[in-house]
Image (cartoon, helix red, strand yellow):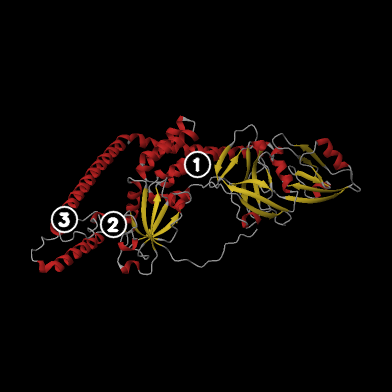
Amino acid sequence: MEKKVAREFRHKVDILIDSDAEKDYLYDVLRMYHQSMDLPVLVGDLKLVINEPSRLPMFEAIRPLIPLKHQVEYDSLTPKRSRKLKEVRLDRTHPEGLGLSVRGGLEFSCGLFISQLVNGGQADNVGLQLGDEIVRINGYSIESCTHGEVINLIRTKKTVSLKVRHVGMIPVKSSSEESLKWQFVDQFVSDAGDGKISLAGLASLGNKEIREKKVFISLVGVKGMGCSISSGPTQKPGIFISNIKPGSVSAEVGLEVGDQIVEVDGVDFTNVEHKEAVRILKSSRSLTLVVLTGAGKELFQTEEERMNDYYRHERERQELMQQKRLALETNKIVKEQLEKERQRKLEITQKTAEEQERFQKEIEQIEVQEQKFKKEWDEDWGERDRGREQPRSLMSTGADIIPHPPPESKKDTTTDDHTQLTADELTEQAVELRKDQGFQKYVEDFDPYSMFTSEQIVGKDVRLLRIKKEGSLDLAVEGGISSPLGKIVVSAIYDGGAADKHGGIVKGDQIMAVNGKILVDATLPEAQTTLAKSWNSGGDWIDLVIAVSPPKDYEDEVTFF
């Protein structure tokens, strides 16, 4: 089983990671984790290699290598990419705006991802998350849309319908010349506050608030607007205000350098040419403008502002590089402990061989005792019970304890009834003795109720489940005989695991036995150990006896948009 998991993991690594250096780094951090068992450090190290959405399946491939006791925490620390689409509706005319910002577009060679959310805003209230990828807007796929085209699509209707899937990563790229990078949402620096944030381009999302506003300008009695406009670069098209004359009409209505003009008197300015924009602005003495405040501010920054931005980006880059250096230096410890690792594996191999040998001897002893029991039974009662059904082999009900054969029958024919009663009682005592040992072996048409006392099963719906060993069991338990629950209870069933695929066990069910091992009086560590050994042992199936949890009354969950 372990060899199969390791083989599948290495196959996944070869598919998703091309660099040999990154592969070596990945193996090093996993070896270091198995030495230190420090899960947060492991996840932090993995994120330096799993650094783009296409590599996210590596987290799932690594999960079987994590001890069962750490898997719940591992799930909480690693992002879960959702394959299902979620649809929400937003009101574009809401006074607080949509309440989100996005990054990406065709011009940046990536999809459109939510990078900021306003606390308590529309998007936040309907359940959108940082790192969600927007797949469809108003029913249209945006896979081949530029950022400007997406904004136009959003503005076509008052109610905006979004279909998203959660990825958990955000693209980072400030120009078309830079290579595309990705950050996990818990690493992404965002200053989203309570302001009115609208959709903005990938390059325009720094540490500033971008909002849409409408202004009215009357040019009656004045020479002009008192501002200059410029077209944006290829990676950020549009018409932007490049200069404002102090005391002019534009200054009075609150226009600023870097504002993007997106509409003038109902005419869309997102893809208009510069000459056409000038003509429209001069065609009327009364103008209604819709602008995105500060959307292109970085295009007209002073040298000092550019340097401040450069230093900020450099600090972020240095912090990431420092994290990587620390991780690589820490991994040297692993290489120094390779000999210890080899010795540990050798010890495990030796213990496994000893365990196999002990198990084989026990099986042989059981078979010898079984044959002896049958032989002595035939010698003592074969003639008297001829024509009757021979008692069922004790191997069908137990495998740990073999009772002593019945005493030799007496020659006196007057004691036949007494002798037969003694044989029946002996069989019942043997079965009860095996139950006391906490182990039973399942046979065809096996009744799971027979494993337990009446006090243990009173009022319970007991069922026997056979679960196919495919991948990981992905089942977590809690409780135990020493806990307030007083029993072993399923605390979680994870999507895609063998338990989830079987469908016969749910959260809240009591696990009463595993592969014949009764867990009614077991502690939590004992139950976890039994589950792990049973799953990793030979065979294609694992047998669980469960007591079904009683149904609960609950109201249907309703999602409001």
Task: Specify the quadrant that holds the C terminus.
Answer: bottom right
Q: CA distance from mark 1 to mark 3?
A: 62 Å
Evaluate whether residue 296 shows in this view: no
Q: Nearer the viewer, mark 1 or mark 3?
A: 3
Q: Nearer the viewer, mark 2 or mark 3?
A: 3
Q: Nearer the viewer, mark 2 or mark 1?
A: 2
The residue tagged 1 is: 57
The residue tagged 3 is: 378
Number of residues whose C-alpha sits closer than 10 Å to that of mark 3, classed few (under 14), some (14–19) or many (20 or more): some
Q: Position of residue 457 (x, y in %)?
A: 34, 66
Looking at the rendered structure, the secondary structure element under dot 1 is: helix
Rendered residue at 27%/42% (across/down): 352
The residue tagged 2 is: 440
Q: CA distance from mark 2 to mark 1?
A: 40 Å
Q: Amino acid at mark 1?
A: Pro
Q: Amino acid at mark 3?
A: Asp
Task: Specify the quadrant that holds the N terminus.
Answer: top left
From the viewer's perspective, is residue 383 above or below residue 109? below
Looking at the rendered structure, the secondary structure element under dot 3 is: helix
Q: Position of residue 29 (x, y in %)?
A: 41, 39
Looking at the rendered structure, the secondary structure element under dot 2 is: loop
Identity of the residue furthest to the front in this view: 387
Q: Position of residue 268 (x, y in %)?
A: 79, 44
From the viewer's perspective, is residue 249 above or below residue 21? below
Q: Along the line of sight, which residue is nearer the eye, 317 or 31?
A: 31
Q: Amino acid at mark 2?
A: Gln
Nearer the N terminus, badge 2 or badge 1? Answer: 1
Query: How many numbered circles does the render carry?
Result: 3
Q: Position of residue 126 (x, y in %)?
A: 62, 56
